[in-house]
Amino acid sequence: MKPTKRILFLSHSASRNGATILLLHFLRWLRDKTDYRIEVLVNGSGELLDEFRAVAPTTAWRSPTFLLEAFPRRWRAAWRPRLEAQCLKAFLAGRRYDLVYANTAATWRQVAFLARRTRGLLWHIHELGYALRLTMGEERIRQLFPLAARFIAVSNPVWYALVKEFGVSEQKVDLVHEFIPIPSLSSESRALRRQLIRQRLGWPETSFVVGGCGSLGWRKGTDVFLQIARKMQMETRDKPIRFLWVGGAAEDKETLEYNHDVRALGLQGHCCCVPSTADVLDYYSAMDVFALPSREDPFPLVMLEAGAQGLPVVCFAGSGGAVEFIGQDAGLVAPYLDVQAFAAHLVRLHDDPHLRGGLGAQAARKVRTLYSLEVQAPKLLQSIERCLASA
């Protein structure tokens, strides 16, 4: 019998974000479909840590570099990689792996060390150019990308960035789109959730709700989301239109900035932000359309989650994988950062229920047939097998 392959999965986080949630879904599927010996190394703690531990032996790693805070900056920069490498070496107690699966570019610090302790490194890239440069920097990208035997790109724009911007051989990149397990909600359940959420928010049942979801900040375009809300408020004063964003934490910097702009723009009562929650399906049920105002987003899970609930998606051209998902039939695309055009698309969807229903139905069909766990997870397994074979 062949020995069971040992695979270490690196997660940059245990918080509730798209890349981590996708990895968790995949690990559950992989555990049930294969006999691989799976281990997980998670950077830090978070609300999903126990869910990882329920799937496979999981170690929560915290960088020891906080010990260097008292030293001058140039000393910290020089000693940080050495300290992390020595601590990881002791942490892993000399273990070796047939494959290391690095989920997101944010695992680069562990990759730099673990690439020497495996026969194969498979790097799952969920970032586009801006986020890659912000996370790693151009110089580290050039140093560390050659350590990977293969890459997984989550959308065509990510594939293009890896190959055309960063010089990765296209023969080494597998295109595997992001995916979700398809939720099963009856129309009665959705109607009840819709009613309860709107009551909780104090919004009329007749409101037209434009929804958004994800972390807050510049890359996700939550400032643009509020500009769109302001534009629509000025042009549709006679229509009960509301804006709902789900994501972020109750008192973090980005949430405070968001709420400051809500007040400054006079959007109180018309625009609400709800902290990140495991019950996000309830909030999708309360929405009529899904707005994705991101400046850069590779292939967001929130788009798939909203699409699965029959919500048409509106996004900006040139922002990443959303345009690929929408195509000609699952939503509408506005020119990059054109707030006027974005708002006009939302008004059109408000005024034309037939168009809204048709685009939403196509979005749901696409998610079910193309971007489900059952469709995409086997492709990730193929990438693992290719990497193991080449190793």
Image (cartoon, rainbow, N blue to C red):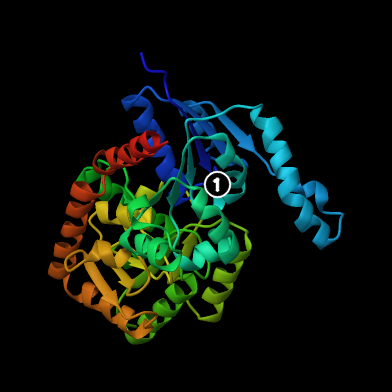
User: In terms of image quadrants, where is residue 348?
Assistant: bottom left
Residue 229's place in the image compared with 18, above or below, is: below
Residue occupying the point 71% across, 44% down: 84
**Towards the viewer: 325 or 288:** 325
Relative vertical location of residue 326 with respect to residue 265 in this rendering, above or below: above
Residue kind at label 1, given as amino acid type: His
Based on the displayed image, in which of its 4 quarters is residue 306 positioned? bottom left
Label 1 secondary element? loop
Position of residue 330 measured from the top left corner of the image (x, y, whole percent):
20, 63
Is 42 on the left or on the right of 350, as rendered? Answer: right
| Image quadrant where one finds the N terminus | top left
Residue 126 left/right relative to 71: left
| Most foreground residue, 12 or 129 | 129
Please, which residue is most extreme toward the top here? 1
Q: Position of residue 375 (x, y in %)?
A: 24, 42
Where residue 16 appears, x then y in whole percent? Answer: 49, 47
Quadrant including the C terminus? top left
Residue 64 appears in view: no
| 36 relative to 305, above or below | above
The answer to whether residue 220 is seen in the rendering is yes
Q: Name the residue located 56 percent from the left edge and 66 percent from the top edge.
A: 138
Tally of numbered tags: 1
- Label 1 Cα neighbours within 10 Å, binned few <14 / some 14-19 / many ≥20: many
Residue under circle 1?
12
271 and 184: which one is in front? Answer: 184
Q: Residue at x 81, y 46 (%)?
A: 67
Residue in the picture at 39% in, 71% down: 293
